[in-house]
C-alpha cells in the first residue's frame, strides 16, 4: 500500500517525459521540413543557369522569355524574408512555365537530350518544392494539434511550445487557372 | 457523374465514349449507367458493400508492426524449440535436439534480419538504379519520400517486363524499393508517383519489417514440414534396428514424432496462407490511402493499378514466400471476388474503386 503513491508518481513522470519528448520531436520535424524547402529552392536556382545555357543558342528569337527567367532567378536568389521569398519564387515558377511552353515550339530543342534531362530535373525540383511545402504543412498540423489537445497542451503551455504558422499559397495562386485555348 | 469503365474501373470524363485507359467501349450515358457497370457481370443491382478502412496514424501502424514482428519472431523461436525437443526425444537425446534447433533458429532468423532485403532483391534480379538512365524514377522517389517525410531509400530496377514494384527493409533508414523495367516503360510520371507513394507508405508504416518476419516464418514452417516428412521415414528406418534405442522409450518417441510430423505437414500450408492473408489485405488498402495522401492525387495510383492489372503483374522469381511484398500479386491476376478469401492482395478493382471514391468519383 505504501508503494501506491510511488507507482502513481512513476507513471505520471513517464508520461510527462514521453509527452515532452514528442513535442520536441515534432518541433524539430517542422524545422527540418522548412529546411527541406530551402534545399529544393536552392537546387532550382542552381539548375536554371544550365538550362539557359543549353537553350539560348536555339532560341535567338525568344530572348525576352529567357531574360525574364534570368531576372526572376536573380530576384528569387536575393529575396529576403519569407513572404518576399515566396513571392519571388512564384514569379520564377511562372517564368519557367512560359519558357517550357516556348520550348514546345522548337522540335530541335525538344529532341535535345540535355534539354529533356534538364526539363525532367526542373519538373522534379518543382514537385519536390511543393511536396516539401506539403510535408511542412502536415508537420505543422500535427504539431499544432498536439499543442492544443488535452492533455499534452498542459506541457506545451508549461514549456512554452508555441503554435507554428502554415506555409500559405499566394492569393493569386489560389484562383483557378484559366486555360487560354483560343 | 463521371463514366466508370466497366472493364478496368478507370474514371472517364462525362462525354467519353471509349475508356481512355483500356479503350473499351463505355456503356451508354443514361443516368446511373456507371453505377450499374460497377457491379459488373454479376448482374446484381445491389451497390457493392462499403467497407471502411480504419485510417491508422503512421506512428500507431509502425508500432503495431514492430510489436507483431517481435511476436512472430518469438513464435518462430518457440516452434523451433518445441520441434527441436521433439526430434531430440524421438532420437533419444533432448539436449542435442534443442541445441540443433537453437542453431537453426539463429541462422534462419539472423539471415532474414540482416540480409532479408538483399536476398529478396537478388531473388528478383534487381540491380541498383542508374542516375543517368533512371533519372525520372530517382526524381519521383525523391519527391515522394519528401512528401512522406522519410529518408531516401535505395532504388532498384528489376529487368522484368511485367508491371510491379515492392519495398523491403527493416526500418525507413535502410529501406529499399524496387520497380520493374516494364513499370517504368508503361507508366506516366503521375502514375509512377502513385506507385512509389504506395511503396513508401509501406516503408513508413514498417509493413516491410513485418513482411520479412512473415516470410521467414512461412519459410521456416515449410522447411520444418519438409524435414519432418522426410525425417519420419528416415527415423523409422533407424528404429527398426533392434540394437538402437531404449526398451520402449524409442517406440513412444517415434509415435509422437510421427504424429507431430504429419500434423505439421498438414498445418504448414494453411498457416502460411492465414499469415499472408492477415498481413496483406488491410495493409494494401491502408498504403493506397496513404499514397493518395502523399500525392494528393488518388487517380494517379488508380490509373497505375488498372494499367498493372491489364498489363500483367507477373515477375520472374515471384513465389509464395515473397508474393505479399509486391504492390499487385506477381503470381497471377485474381478475378474481382473469386479468390478473395485466400489472396494476399485485395482485388485490384476494389482498390481502384476506393481510390476513385477518394477523388470524389463514383460510389464505393
Image: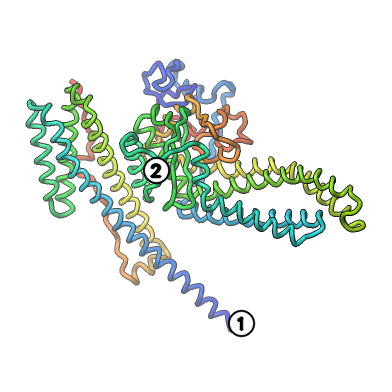
Location of residue B259 in the rendering, given as x and y in whole percent from the top left corner: 82, 47
User: Does the rendering let one see residue B349?
Assistant: no
Subunit of label 2: B
Real-space Cα separation, disc 2 to disc 1, in angstroms: 50 Å
Location of residue A54 in the rendering, given as x and y in whole percent from the top left corner: 15, 33
Is B93 left or right of A132, judged from the image as shown?
right
Decide which of A68, B219 is in the foreground and name it: B219
Q: Residue at x 77, y 57 (%)?
A: B88
B65 lies above or below B324: below
Residue located farthest toward the front when viewing the structure as drawn: B243
Residue topped by disc 2: B293
Q: Residue at x 46, y 27 (%)?
A: B161
Q: Residue at x 57, y 44 (%)?
A: B279
Q: Residue at x 27, y 34 (%)?
A: A120
Is A155 left or right of B27, judged from the image as shown?
left
Occupied quadrant, residue B193: top left
Q: Tag 1, which secondary structure? A: loop
Q: Tag 2, which secondary structure? A: helix
Decide which of B10, A28 is in the foreground and name it: A28
A58 lies above or below A140: above
| Label disc, if present, on residue A164 of the rendered structure | none
Tell me the quarter of the image containing the N terminus of chain B.
top left
> Same chain for marks 2 and 1?
no
Location of residue B66 in the rendering, given as x and y in whole percent from the top left corner: 53, 55
Q: Residues within 10 Å of mark 2 (few under 14, many from 20)?
A: some
Occupied quadrant, residue B157: top left
Location of residue A127 in the rendering, given as x and y in whole percent from the top left corner: 28, 40
Residue topped by disc 1: A1
Decide which of A72, B33 is in the foreground and name it: A72
Amino acid at each position: 500500500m505504501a508503494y501506491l503513491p510511488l507507482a502513481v508518481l512513476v507513471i505520471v513522470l513517464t508520461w510527462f517525459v514521453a509527452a515532452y519528448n514528442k513535442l520536441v520531436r515534432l518541433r524539430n520535424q517542422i524545422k527540418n521540413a522548412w529546411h527541406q524547402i530551402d534545399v529544393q529552392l536552392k537546387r532550382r536556382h542552381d539548375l536554371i543557369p544550365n538550362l539557359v545555357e543549353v537553350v539560348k543558342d536555339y532560341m535567338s528569337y525568344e530572348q525576352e522569355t529567357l531574360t525574364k527567367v534570368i531576372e526572376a532567378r536573380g530576384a528569387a536568389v536575393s529575396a529576403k524574408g519569407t513572404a518576399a521569398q515566396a513571392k519571388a519564387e512564384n514569379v520564377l515558377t511562372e517564368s519557367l512555365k512560359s519558357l517550357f511552353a516556348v520550348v514546345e515550339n522548337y522540335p530541335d530543342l525538344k529532341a535535345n537530350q540535355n534539354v529533356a534531362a534538364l526539363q525532367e530535373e526542373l519538373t522534379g525540383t518543382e514537385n519536390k518544392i511543393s511536396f516539401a511545402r506539403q510535408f511542412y504543412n502536415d508537420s505543422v498540423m500535427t504539431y499544432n494539434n498536439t499543442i492544443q489537445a488535452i492533455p499534452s497542451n498542459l506541457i506545451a503551455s508549461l514549456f512554452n511550445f508555441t503554435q507554428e504558422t502554415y506555409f500559405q499559397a499566394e492569393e493569386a495562386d489560389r484562383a483557378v487557372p484559366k486555360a487560354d485555348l483560343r | 457523374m463521371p463514366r466508370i469503365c466497366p472493364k478496368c474501373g478507370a474514371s472517364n470524363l462525362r462525354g467519353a465514349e471509349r475508356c481512355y485507359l483500356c479503350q473499351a467501349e463505355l456503356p451508354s450515358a443514361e443516368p446511373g449507367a456507371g453505377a450499374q457497370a460497377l457491379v459488373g457481370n454479376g448482374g446484381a443491382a445491389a451497390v457493392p458493400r462499403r467497407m471502411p478502412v480504419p485510417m491508422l496514424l503512421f506512428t500507431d501502424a509502425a508500432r503495431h508492426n514492430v510489436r507483431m514482428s517481435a511476436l512472430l519472431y518469438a513464435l518462430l523461436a518457440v516452434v523451433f524449440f518445441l520441434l527441436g525437443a521433439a526430434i531430440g526425444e524421438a532420437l533419444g537425446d533432448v539436449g542435442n535436439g534443442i541445441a540443433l534447433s537453437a542453431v537453426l533458429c539463429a541462422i534462419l532468423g539472423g539471415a532474414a534480419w540482416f540480409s532479408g532485403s538483399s536476398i529478396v532483391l537478388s531473388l528478383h534480379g534487381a540491380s541498383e538504379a542508374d542516375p543517368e538512365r533512371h533519372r525520372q524514377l530517382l526524381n519521383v522517389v525523391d519527391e515522394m519520400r519528401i512528401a512522406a517525410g522519410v529518408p531516401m531509400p535505395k532504388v532498384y530496377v528489376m529487368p522484368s517486363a511485367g508491371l510491379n514494384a515492392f519495398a523491403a527493409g527493416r526500418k525507413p533508414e535502410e529501406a529499399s524499393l524496387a520497380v520493374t523495367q516494364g513499370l517504368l516503360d508503361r507508366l506516366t510520371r503521375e502514375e509512377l508517383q502513385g506507385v512509389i507513394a504506395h511503396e513508401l507508405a509501406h516503408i513508413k508504416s514498417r509493413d516491410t519489417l513485418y513482411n520479412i518476419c512473415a516470410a521467414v516464418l512461412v519459410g521456416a514452417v515449410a522447411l520444418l514440414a519438409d524435414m519432418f516428412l522426410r525425417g519420419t521415414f528416415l527415423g523409422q528406418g533407424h528404429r527398426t534396428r533392434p540394437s538402437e534405442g531404449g526398451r520402449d522409450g524409442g517406440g513412444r518417441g517415434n509415435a509422437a514424432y510421427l504424429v507431430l510430423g504429419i500434423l505439421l505437414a498438414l498445418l504448414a500450408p494453411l498457416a502460411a496462407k492465414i499469415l499472408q492473408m492477415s498481413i496483406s489485405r488491410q495493409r494494401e488498402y491502408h498504403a493506397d490511402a496513404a499514397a493518395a495522401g502523399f500525392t494528393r492525387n488518388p487517380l494517379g495510383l488508380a490509373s497505375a493499378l488498372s494499367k498493372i492489372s491489364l498489363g500483367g503483374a507477373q515477375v520472374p522469381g515471384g513465389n509464395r514466400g515473397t508474393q505479399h511484398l509486391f504492390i499487385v500479386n506477381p503470381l497471377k491476376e485474381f478475378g474481382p471476388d473469386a479468390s478473395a478469401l485466400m489472396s494476399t492482395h485485395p482485388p485490384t478493382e476494389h482498390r481502384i474503386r476506393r481510390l476513385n471514391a477518394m477523388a470524389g468519383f463514383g460510389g464505393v
